[in-house]
Image (cartoon, rainbow, N blue to C red):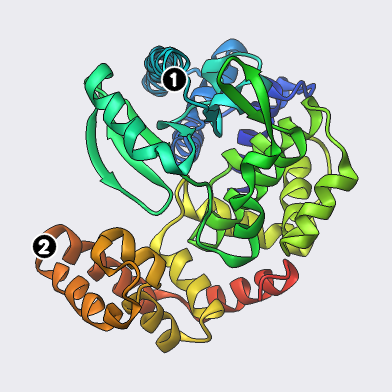
Amino acid sequence: MEKIIRAMMDLIAGEVCDKPIDYSQYRFSEEELARLYDLSKSHDLAHLVGDALIKNDLTEHDEIRVKFQKQIMLAVYRYEKIRFESDRLRDLFNENEIRFIPLKGAVIRDCYPEPWMRTSCDIDILVPAGQVDEVARLIEERLGYTYQKKNYHDISMLSDGGVHLELHHTIRENKKNIDGLLSDCWSYATAYDRYEYRFDSEFLLFHQFAHTFHHFLDGGCGVRPFLDVFLLERKTRFDRETLDSMLTGAGIKKFSDAISKLGAIWFENDVHSDTTRLIEQFVLSGGVYGNAENSAAVGQQTERGRLGYMLHRLWLPYELLCLSYPHLHGRRYLQPLYEVKRWFRVFDPDVRKRKRKALSAIGAVSDKKKSDVNRMLHELGLL
């Protein structure tokens, strides 16, 4: 597996990070190409790996080459759909004098050689919290989007062409250590073009680290955030002292250092440590969104055991519960009743399936996995 991992990272580094690669060292069997395809696809990076393979004539097997070509075409198609909808939204916001901040891929793809190379599953846009409901109605009326539901930090909407929009009213992650700074995000934004704002470089990087931290503790974040950080740190101007102060204040400086370190190992020529090996195993095993086993392994460490983790999942935090049940807001004394009401969702077949999978994962975590995750979290200063 080590050869496949190293090959995937080298191919990506040669494709988007300007790293000189001796492609003659790579000759793959059909089985190895299939494993390379599966690994890269699980992290939504098969389009980058495939483009590098095809350009350097490293795919001798037609069936695998066709699979990679489809991923390249899909990445371009997804980008064009997102670009089209982003332009419509940008025009609508400017016409109606609505301040907005594009988030995540919309900004980070500027660091990639070509914009289609930075894939996204949706469009993320932040608007002032007090305007979010009004803006959502405007998008429904003027652009034909379908309102789906209101979540902790966004309203989920869908265009008639199938593009998912997360209309953010906040970028908080429901984690106290990072939410203080994330709540003040508009203070770190400056006008970019008419009513479009962009984050200062230091805050842009902080948000990237904080968002990765959130997903990492929820079971994994995939390889792409490491690539994003690697490119942002090398292709944007920022004040390191200011960024480090933000990261230290939020308690994620050790974590951010490890993210940068592993990116330098994967996409440059840095050398692994015991900690980066543990992070690599954790991230690669989880795929682009993490998995239930990783989530259970982390949860049992941060919630002090299996029972604590199960109770944490059963008892939803008050702030999150208010989003599902708006009438609870300001009536915290009713929280136990609404917790019980939420439990009755288990009669929904889809919910029951997810809960069964999560419970199975809790019992399936091996002692070695628990030990490795415990050591990794300690090294990252997260316990």
Residue at the far right: name it: 241
Q: Amino acid at mark 2?
A: Asp
Q: How many marks?
A: 2
Q: Is residue 131 visible?
A: yes
**Residue 204 relative to residue 351: left or right:** right
x then y, percent, for residue 238: 83, 34
Where 93 falls versus 189 (above or below)? above
Front position in the image: 12 or 159:
159
Where 134 falls versus 82 (above or below)? below
x then y, percent, for residue 144: 22, 20
**Residue at the spot x=11%, y=62% of the render?**
348
Front position in the image: 308 or 182:
182
From the image, tell me which residue sits under label 1. 93
* In front: label 1 or label 2: 1
**Residue 330 relative to residue 11: left or right:** left
Mark earlier in primary sequence (1, 2): 1
From the image, tell me which residue sits under label 2. 348
Where 161 falls versus 337 (above or below)? above
Q: Residues within 10 Å of mark 2 (few under 14, many from 20)?
A: few
Q: Is residue 168 visible?
A: no
**Residue at the spot x=73%, y=36% of the render?**
230
Where 71 falls versus 246 (above or below)? above
**Residue 23 relative to residue 152: left or right:** right
Q: Residues within 10 Å of mark 1 (few under 14, many from 20)?
A: many
Q: Secondary structure at mark 2?
A: loop
x then y, percent, for residue 77: 38, 14
Front position in the image: 299 or 246:
246
